[in-house]
Image (cartoon, rainbow, N blue to C red):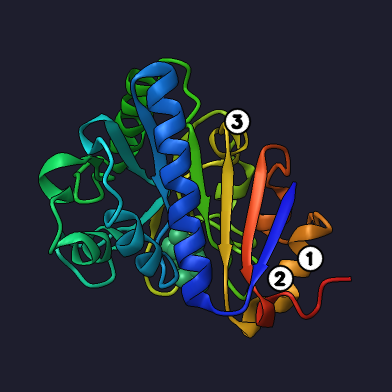
Amino acid sequence: MEIRTFQSASEVAKEAADYIADRIRENIAKKGIFTMAISGGRTPWEMIKALAAHDLPWEKVFLFQVDERIAPDGHPDRNLTQLFKSIEDTKLPTRLNIFPMHVVAEDLDQACLEYSESIRRITETGKLDLIHLGIGTDGHTASLIPGDEVLQVVDRDVALTGNPYQGRYRMTLTYPLINQAEKILWVITGEEKAEMLNRLLHQDPAIPAGNISQEHTIILTEESAAVSIN
Ligand SMILES: O=C1O[C@H](COP(=O)(O)O)[C@@H](O)[C@H](O)[C@H]1O
């Protein structure tokens, strides 16, 4: 596991975008495509904007969601809405292969199954080339929420939370799928994340983020978030 620390959140976003762009070039040169999953929340969008500025063969990039709120299409709570907003002035909406989580489906369990089948069909191995993760101040990552039954899911790659979290049920990639990614990229900024970053580094099993594999993992973080590392 590698950790790199930068002075500001903007620098972290730029470095994360450069890191993903390098993985895109590397994987496309090796096997013709690149598969990744992007988290939501508030942190990723500056990184996505910086990534979109790279000149890359976007038609060969397959983008999945790490998690999504169960909410109507276009709703501001949806991670997908924020993703599209961050790339709206770029060529990406027409060039990139985006796979939205189908959270408006009548049968959400079936939608989870179909999403994991899409990942298997595109990747062939079931392993994504890169999964981007963030961390909440309670130690959640993806929609792996403290105390929720979704933490126990080991037989499915995509699942629903058992309870609403911050007002919404969620669909999320589960531990088994996340932990077998070729690369895991954490992007963690803000002093409010300092305690959880330290617990993540110590693999504290009491927080969901502590149960994510540290193999093939890089953390890009900001000085203010790294202050509690011991
Ligand atoms: O609820 C969520 O929060 C986490 C953390 O978001 P951040 O903006 O504080 O980094 C995020 O990783 C997850 O995808 C999202 O749904």
Establish whether ligand 1 lies closer than 8 Å to the Cβ of label 2: no
- Nearer to me, 27 or 145: 27
Q: Residues within 10 Å of mark 1 (few under 14, many from 20)?
A: some
Amino acid type of disc 3? Gln
Number of dots carrying numbers: 3
Image spot of residue 156 (x, y percent): 50, 31
Q: Residues within 10 Å of mark 3 (few under 14, many from 20)?
A: some
Residue 194 falls in which quadrant of the image?
bottom right
- Residue lying at 34% horizontally and 62% vertically, measured from the top left: 50
Local secondary structure at mark 1: helix
Image spot of residue 45 (x, y percent): 35, 67
Q: Which residue is mark 1?
A: 199
- Residue lying at 53% horizontally and 68% vertically, measured from the top left: 12
Local secondary structure at mark 3: loop
Q: CA distance from mark 1 to mark 2?
A: 5 Å
- Does the CB distance between marks 2 and 3 fall below 8 Å? no
Q: Which residue is mark 3?
A: 180
Q: CA distance from mark 1 to mark 3?
A: 21 Å
Q: Kindly tell me whether residue 12 is visible in this rendering.
A: yes
Image spot of residue 214 (x, y percent): 73, 44
Report the residue that reaches farthest toward the right: 230
Q: Which residue is mark 2?
A: 196
- Nearer to me, 195 or 10: 10
Question: In the rendered view, would you say 42 is above or below 44?
Answer: below
